[in-house]
Image (cartoon, rainbow, N blue to C red):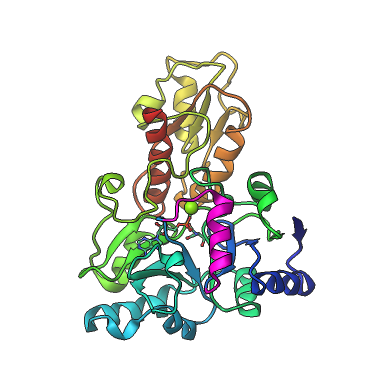
Amino acid sequence: MHILAPSDEGLRKAAEALTAGLLVAFPTETVYGLGGDGFNRHALARIFAAKGRPRFDPLIIHIAALDSLERIAAIASLELTLRNKLDLLCARLWPGPLTLILPKQPEVPDLATSGLPTVAVRFPDHQVAQQLIRLSTGAVAAPSANPFGYLSPTRAEHVQEQLGDQVTFIIDGGPCGIGVESTVLDLTAGSPRILRPGGTPRERIEEIIGAVEGPPVDSVRMFHSPGQLKSHYAPRTGLTLHRREEMILLPYEPSEAYLFFDRSSWDAWVQGPGHPYEVEPGWTETSRIRLLSERGNLDEAATRLFDTLHELDTIGVSVIRAQWVPDAGRGAAINDRLSRAAARTQAS
Ligand code: TXA
Ligand code: MG
């Protein structure tokens, strides 16, 4: 494995490797992707093997031009109202952190879609990702570049630590701006339905195409999106989730980590009855006590979520006590990822 800078030379090398069926990890605006040629069965098989991902969990095909969409999705077979919604979403939200589920073209290998009649397509809003896709095959299958069930990577170093042996190149484009995966929106099932909350808030989608459904209350059991397994997005360290009222009363334990949403919750905890003797009001972060966003900005919290969980996962604490965030905007995606991490803790 080599780490490449996103220079012309680096991108050319990476694109050659992709075109030859090898795997390249690359930055997007959401998280790092583990890329392989979306039309090459060998490359697709390598992706599943590298991640240890079950083959029933389909991949997203990444494009870098709107006119690539018809190569992958059978748009003509969509009913007219959905077709109109698709056009609006493409015009207004692409490129961006939105993945659309559409009827698939027969040429897309079944391995990419796990045999489903539908395909996931995304046009990422990241220069490096776009150039790589354009310079290679125009259709790059890429799941998040983490081992199956582990936290998604938001830095090249995360990929290197987790999947370094499995890829030919990692393009280092620095930290990802959005920090949570794309929103997955199904446009094949009558009315549009969110299968995975993510970087594009539901409110933003509804402004453009009107009301959307989902995600189902228990999307895990209902299994609408095959990737919605409980083990997803989890740190190895156990995690418990607490509402603000509960969080600020937690007794301080030196063996535990605390992940606060905002400064006001942190301060309330420091002043509360669980009062940790080591922590004075106004203290900034320690390695075990962390803050997602000083002022409670949900976009900033999303950007920092996986990065912070990665760090807390390496410092040897007994458990991570995390605070729910407000459910608006990208808060829905943050709460989704946190609750999956907590669900695994309960199950194991
Ligand atoms: O932001 C992202 O979407 C990142 C970056 C790399 O683009 N990619 C990503 O891929 O998160 P992955 O494989 O980790 O998640 C893809 C999700 C899974 O939950 C999968 O089940 C769902 O999309 N999916 C893919 N194809 C589908 C389909 N045909 N029907 C329903 N869900 C599908
Ligand atoms: Mg993933």
Above or below 176: residue 305 = above
x and y, in percent, of residue 173 in the image: 68, 61
Pick whichever, 44 or 100, lies toward us.
Answer: 44
Residue 90 image offset from top left, x and y in percent: 40, 78
Q: Viewed as shown, does residue 114 lie left or right of 39?
A: left
Q: Reply above or below: 152 against 342.
A: below
Residues rendered magenta in the picture: 39-55
Vertical position of residue 161 compared to residue 249: above or below: below
Residue 7 position by quadrant: bottom right
Return the residue found at the far right.
Answer: 9
| Residue pictured at 41% horizontal, 34% vertical | 344
Q: Is 308 colored magenta in this rendering?
A: no
Quarter in which the N terminus is drawn: bottom right
Q: What percent of the width, then of the height, locates residue 48?
A: 52, 56
Q: How many marks?
A: 0
Residue 254 location, quadrant: top right
Residue 235 image position (x, y, % from top left): 52, 36
Name the magenta segment's main secondary structure: helix
Q: Quadrant of residue 18?
A: bottom right
At horizontal 35% and vertical 81% (from top left) the residue drawn is: 74
Please give the name of the residue rendered at 34% of the width and 82% of the height, measured from the top-left corner: 75
Q: Which of the pair 341/323 is nearer the observer?
A: 341
> Nearest the camera: 258 or 52?
52
Instruction: Report the quarter where the C terminus lies.
Output: top left
Q: Say if the magenta span includes residue 46.
A: yes
